[in-house]
Amino acid sequence: MKKLLIASRNPDKLLELRELLHGLEVELFSLLDFPELPPTDEDQPGIRENAAKKALEAARGTGLLSLADDTGLFIEALDGQPGVHSARFAGEHCSYKDNRDKALRLLLGESNRRAHFKTCAVLAAPDGVVAISEGIVSGVMSHEEKGENGFGYDNIFEPDPGGRSYAQMSDAEKNSLSHRARALQAILPTLKEIIEIE
Ligand code: IMP
């Protein structure tokens, strides 16, 4: 069976990606299976470049077809922040909660709550990038944390038409409409073609 490496060690992401790839005829691995590989320095100017760097380093380090995603939350009133810096918005070793607190603090009294999540997915083989896709979901930043599910900024982002945060949805519901699901759906036809050829 063809092997596919999910180029991540983030358990929250791995859970979602494994679910989104369910049913695909591949043997799935993640970077947790390759502890000797150093983490990719996500130092690129955009999420597309970071996703490509992660996918290529993983493919070259393991010899496996690799899928990476990079995600950013872009808040209109903050000129697109945290964007590519979403993981370390509140500092180098901050928690998800530190990041959410900072976003809500900066938005205090702000009436424009519009924001979007963007995921870029990249499929790479050791000799180069094979496919790139994007998934975007627009919505609003809530005024306080809502819900317990999910991770990252899920408790403070309400996808359109609004009213409920990602964290108030079941895993299956978030996976049916999320930015990551859209990016995965867009790259899936290429992934399936490669799997069928080999
Ligand atoms: P990454 O660089 O793709 O790992 O994502 C950067 C940061 O964005 C993560 O550390 C999370 O805080 C946040 N993030 C990524 N995906 C999601 C999501 O689906 N929901 C909420 N936050 C997310």
Image (cartoon, rainbow, N blue to C red):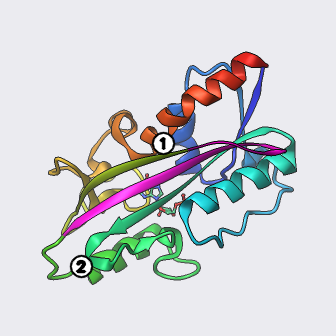
Q: Amino acid at mark 2?
A: Leu
Q: Nearer the viewer, mark 2 or mark 1?
A: 1
Q: Vertical placement of 94 versus 21: above or below?
A: below
Q: Amino acid at mark 1?
A: Ala
Q: Residue at x 86, y 51 (%)?
A: 61
Judge whether residue 149 can be spotted in this image: no
Q: Is residue 75 visible?
A: yes
Q: Position of residue 181 (x, y in %)?
A: 44, 39
Horizontal and vertical percent position of residue 197: 75, 18
Q: Which residues are magenta?
A: 113-132
> In the image, is the residue at mark 1 within 8 Å of ligand 1 by its beta carbon?
no
**x and y percentages locating residue 62 in the rendered image:** 85, 45
Q: Is residue 123 magenta?
A: yes
Q: Which residue is mark 2?
A: 107
| Residue annotated with mark 1 | 183
Q: Residue at x 73, y 63 (%)?
A: 40
x then y, percent, for residue 192: 63, 23
Whether 17 is drawn above or below 88: the answer is above
Q: Residue at x 56, y 26 (%)?
A: 189
